[in-house]
Every structure is written in C-alpha cells, then in structure tokens.
Amino acid sequence: MKELKDLTETEQVGVLHKSISREIVQEIMNYGVTQQQILDIINLLALELEDNNMMRSIVDLCKSNKTEKLHV
C-alpha cells in the first residue's frame, strides 16, 4: 500500500474526504441508531444526491427492503 506521502494531491484529498465520511458515520453510530434508522438515513441521504439515477437506485433498494420486511 502506498504511503500517504507517495499519493498525488488528488489521492490525498480523496483519503481526507473518506476519513471525514468515516468520522460522520462513527458519530451517527455513537448516537445509537437502530437498523431501520440506518436505512432511513441512507434513504434521506440518497435524496440529496445530484446523480438522479444513483438516487433512484438507492431509494428503490431501500423501498424494496422495507417491502420485503412487510411481507415476512
């Protein structure tokens, strides 16, 4: 694996962004959320995506998961 100093500036920015994302997720998990709340958060975040196709795919996946649980 490359050392941080061996990464390009773009790769370093990517690593920093992923690190911040992990910290946000950890903070949510520390808050104490249920599995359903995690799915709700994923769904709400998906609605904020600029990529409409990706947004629809994630929302549809969340809906199908909710529908499956109702039929079990």
Image: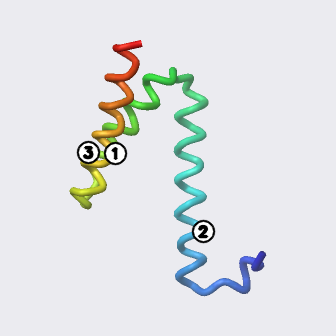
Residue 18, labelled with which disc? none
Please identify the quadrant where the N terminus is shown. Answer: bottom right
Q: Position of residue 19 (x, y in %)?
A: 60, 58
In the figure, 20 relative to 66: above or below? below
Residue visible at 28% across and 54% down in the picture: 49
The residue under label 2 is 15
In the figure, 26 relative to 39: above or below? below
Residue 47, labelled with which disc? 3
Q: Determine the image quadrant of residue 59.
A: top left
Crowd around label 1: few <14 · some 14–19 · many ≥20 (10 Å): some
Residue visible at 52% across and 34% down in the picture: 28
Which comes sooner in the sequence, label 1 or label 3?
Answer: 3
Q: Position of residue 35 (x, y in %)?
A: 50, 24
- The three-letter amino acid code for the residue at tag 3 is Leu
The residue under label 1 is 58
Which comes sooner in the sequence, label 1 or label 2?
Answer: 2
Q: What is the secondary structure assignment of the residue under circle 3?
A: loop
Q: What is the secondary structure assignment of the residue under circle 2?
A: helix
Q: Determine the image quadrant of residue 50.
A: bottom left
From the viewer's perspective, is 39 left or right of 34?
Answer: left
Q: What is the secondary structure assignment of the residue under circle 1?
A: helix
